[in-house]
Amino acid sequence: MQKIAVDMDEVIADFLAKQIRLFNESYDFQIKKEDLLGKNLDQLFPQYQKVLHDMVADPNYFADLGIIEGAQEALWQLSQDYEVFITTAAMEFPSSFAAKYEWLTQHFDFIPDSHYVFCGQKSILGADYLIDDNSRHFQGFNGKGLLFSAPHNLTENYPDRLDNWEAALDYFYGSAR
């Protein structure tokens, strides 16, 4: 059975919606996802880099993230025909482990927790495919990298892009669905 590794933040978990909401509430801005075309919040507001980092470093930040539209249904369908792993570069925020684990067990309970991979370098993954919103994770990865669209990567020219979970299902199943 082929293996699909799926990133967590901005692929199945709506990391950005919470970050924007908290940032807007804290600093009285009206930022929307559309304002971040090709950028992250810390690139748009470099003077707030430490605040944004500290916000995400909170151990509970990842506990109540929303779910990217279509992710649950698509991963359930893919898990019927592929071995699906959730892979998150959690070493960037080690305090996030517990909250990410709980979030996954709550929202993706059909994926066994033995298939949750908390790592720093995704090149170690032995999957056939990696769905991720950061193309840097494809460097050294031996399978096929599929860039999942997110506001920060929309200006990036990458040949294998999935705009949403419907597009992911089309990629893996084509007209057979």
Image (spheres, grey):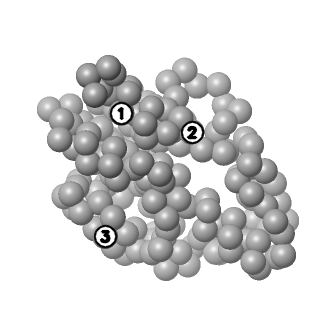
- Mark 2 residue element: loop
Spot occupied by residue 175 in the image (x, y as percentages of width and height): 32, 20
* 97 vs 2: above or below: below
| Label ID, residue 169 | 1
Residue 106: image tag: 3
Label 2 or label 1, whichever comes before in sequence order: 2
Q: Is residue 115 above or below residue 139?
A: below
Q: In the figure, residue 51 lies in which quadrant? A: bottom right
Q: Amino acid at mark 3?
A: Gln
Which class describes the residues within 10 Å of circle 1: few (<14), some (14-19), or many (20+)?
many
Q: Is residue 176 left or right of residue 152?
A: left
**How far apart in space, not on screen, are marks 3 and 2 (Cα)?**
24 Å
Select label 3 or label 1 by which is in front. Answer: 1
Q: Relative to 4, is 71 on the left or the right?
A: right
Q: Tell me the distance, in whole angstroms, between the alpha carbons under discs 3 and 1.
A: 23 Å
Q: Is residue 159 left or right of residue 22?
A: left
Crowding near the residue tagged with mark 3, few <14, some 14–19, many ≥20 C-alpha atoms within 10 Å: few
Residue 177: % across, % down = 28, 28
Mark 2, Cα crowd under 10 Å, few <14 / some 14-19 / many 20+, is many
Give the residue type at disc 2.
Answer: Ser
